[in-house]
Every structure is written in structure tokens, then in C-alpha cells.
Amino acid sequence: MTEKDKEMVVTPWEVSGDIDYDKLIEQFGVQPMTADLAERIAKHAGGMHLQLRRGVYLSHRDLDWWLGEYEKGRRVGLYTGRGPSGHVHLGHLLPWLFCKYLQDAFDADLYFQMTDDEKFLHNDELTLEQAVSYTYDNALDVIACGLDPEKTFIFSDTDHIGEIYRLGLKVAKRVTFSTVKAVFGFQDSTNIGMIWYPALQAMTCFLQSVREGENIPCLIPAAIDQDNYWRMTRDIAEKMGYYKPAQIHAKFLPGLAQGGKMSASQPDTAIFTTDPPRKAAQKVMRAFTGGRDTVEEQKRLGGKPEVCNVYAYYYFLFEEDDDELLERERLCRSGGIMCGECKRRLADRVKVFLTGFQEKRERARDVLCDYLMK
Ligand code: TYM
């Protein structure tokens, strides 16, 4: 790998290179997450979510304010989304599972935007019909995360345009071409659909307020790749009479290969929720680990969990018990477990998880309509 390959790129459309989260916090001008904020969330939720305990959320903007508003007895809202360009992978599930936890804890409505327009405009190979059909396929995954149908409003940019266009226009009028060029790196060759699109991702921050006729503080849980949108939105929110949206930013679940995040554009190194469990298990068995070249070296020197993707999956999703996780780390470092065995155990967990998730996904077909924004 050359130095150039390793250079960090984090945009809504590309995440590559060696990711340095401290540097991102500085570059994006966001606040590091704190133990105090995690505790405040946990107090309202009645327990600390694995993703909070393990530092999956690295940073935020105005989370303290959003929590403060709730603590004063005000209603608060949530917003997240998906660009439906293919099947959903485990990385996408991280913020959605966290939304379920926050929805229950704060009794909050969740607006869930399906950006079929964004993906169609951005991806040369994707037809509009495919993007729209992935919208409803991916919605099954969102529902399978256990969200409340009474409090979840899933909408497609293309199918719901009648309800969102006016608010999108009001945002668009406030944002200049030079701003989107600076924030997103758009160029003269960028198609004009993409240049307009950020107005639609921004408008959802205010959608609940508009629909309810009252200003409602909005929090966006997502990985940090979406941050460009929020920088743009926060600049115009108050001028439009709304609160600036708050954010809580997740780290990326890595792919199965060395380096980089889990990405649908590298299907062999991503685990999709629609993968047959046996196929997913086979992918795990081929995963990059922090193991040594030989069994003898592994026993003598131990493995390196800090660079191991298999360990990362236990850490992010598949080992709920903190003591068990510590024991796994100890065994690995001391050479007490070989990578093959560790992968086999993870593969079993992935199979169990996918089997259960796919059952929920199938059941979601019958209730999909209950979740669509009306
Ligand atoms: P999309 O479809 O690229 O990603 C959907 C969500 O998954 C997060 N994500 C990940 N999280 C952890 N590990 C990974 N490997 C990983 N890969 C993706 C993304 O941060 C995102 O939260 N433009 C958006 C759609 C959108 C949206 C939003 C997302 C519209 N409004 C509000 C978040 C919040 C998109 O294409 O997401």
C-alpha cells in the first residue's frame, strides 16, 4: 500500500485510508464524546448501551443541549437515514440499533430518510428504479431493528417528494453554490441533481418541527461520514427559525479485509443482512486478523486485538458481556487462542444473529405500511 492509499478520506460518499478519529474531531470541529454525557443518556435509558460503553460514539455537537432540553421536560426528536444503493450491511445497523435505544429512552419520534435520489444521482451504475426498490427493501432492515411503528416515520425522497419539497426549497434558497462547493467539494462537472440534493438531507432536521408546528430539538445519530451535511445545515438553521440539529457521531465498523470501513462496494468484505448465514460465516473465516504468521509465533508472542477485525466485531456488536470481552482480549494477547478458533466462534455468533434478524426482516413485510410517513 502506498502512502497515498493510506491517506484518510472521510466524506458522505467515500471513506478510505487509515482513519485517525482524533484528527477528524479536530478537522470537523466537533466535540469529543464524554463519560458524563454517556452517563446522562444511560440514566434516562435505564442502562448504558454497548455502543456507549465501548466508545463507539466518538464525538457530538450540542448533545448536552439536546439532553438538557429533554431534562427540562421538553419533547425531543431523532433523525437518521440511509442511501439505498444496495443491501444493508452490519455497519449500517450500528446507528439504527442505537436509534432504537434512544427512541425508547427519550420517547422520541424518529424521522428516517431514504435518499434514493442521492444514490441515483451519485452512482452511475444505479438506475432510479433500483434505488427506489432498495428503499423498501432496506426499510425492512430498519424495522427489524425493533423501532416503534407509532414513533417511526420512514420516507423516500422520491415517493414522498410532495411532503418534503417545500421545506427543501426553503433550505435551498439559503445555501449558495459556493457553499456546497466548499463543503462537499462539488465541481463544474458535478451533476446539478447532486448540487441540489444537500438541501433535502438538511430539511429533515426541521421536518418534525414543521409537521408539528412547534420547534422540536433534533438529534442525529450516524457515523461521522455524514458530517458535511450537518455543518451546512447548522449554518442556516437559526436563520430559518429552527434549532441547530445536534449530532452524535459513530466510528466505522471495519470491513473484513485489512483497513477501511465495512462498505457495500466491497461485497466480499462486508456482511449483508441478506447474506445466507452460512455464506456470512465463510466470509468471517476469511477475515483479516491481528494474528502472527505461524502457530508457534502466535503462541509465543500472542495476537494483536487492536488491529484485528474479528476482535472489532466482538467489540462493536457480538460480545455484549464486558468481562467476556476482556477475557477474549487476554487470551488473544497471551497466545491462548488461535485466530482460526476465534473466527469460528464469531462465525457461529454471526450465523445466529443473521438467522434471527432475517426472521424479523421477513415479518417486517407485513407491517411496512405502518412505518411509512403519512
Ligand atoms: P448510507 O446509506 O451511506 O449509510 C447509512 C448509515 O450507516 C452509517 N454507516 C456506518 N456506520 C458504521 N460503520 C460503517 N461501516 C458504516 N457505513 C455506513 C452512515 O453513517 C449512515 O448513518 N446520505 C445518507 C443517508 C441519510 C442519512 C441522513 C444518514 C439521509 N439522512 C441522516 C444519516 C443521518 C447515506 O447515504 O447513508
Image: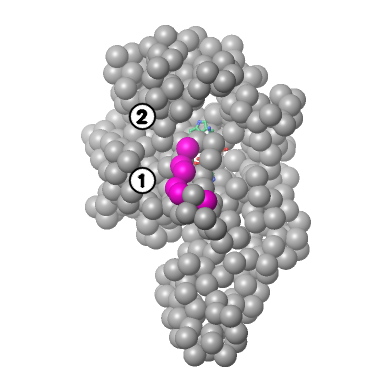
Q: Quadrant of the C terminus?
A: top right
95 is within the stretch colored magenta: no
Q: Nearer the viewer, residue 364 or 59?
A: 59
Whole-percent x and y of residue 149?
57, 35
Please state if 38 lies on the left or on the right of 120 as rendered: left
Mark 2 surroundings within 10 Å by alpha-carbon count, few (fewer than 14), some (14 through 19), many (20 or more):
some
Q: Tell me the quarter of the image containing the N terminus.
A: bottom right
Q: Residue 114, position in %: x, y?
A: 59, 29
> Magenta segment, which residues?
5-11
Residue at mark 2 to residue at mark 1: CA–CA distance: 14 Å
In the rendered image, residue 44, in percent from the top left (x then y), is placed at 33, 47
When the figure is inspected, residue 336 is found, relative to residue 159, above or below; the finding is below
Picture residue at 45% right of the left edge, 81% below the top: 333
Q: Which residue is mark 1?
A: 24
Residue 215, above or below 285: above
Q: Residue at x 53, y 12 (%)?
A: 165
Q: Amino acid under label 2?
A: Arg
Q: Earlier in the sequence, mark 2 or mark 1?
A: 1
Task: Examine the rendered structure and indicate whether residue 255 appears above or below residue 246.
Answer: below
Left or right, 150 with reference to 229:
right
State the mark number for residue 231: 2
In the rendered structure, which amino acid carries the disc numbered 1? Answer: Leu
Mark 1 nearby-residue class (10 Å; few <14, some 14–19, many ≥20): some
Q: Which residue is depicted at the point 47% across and 43% down? A: 9
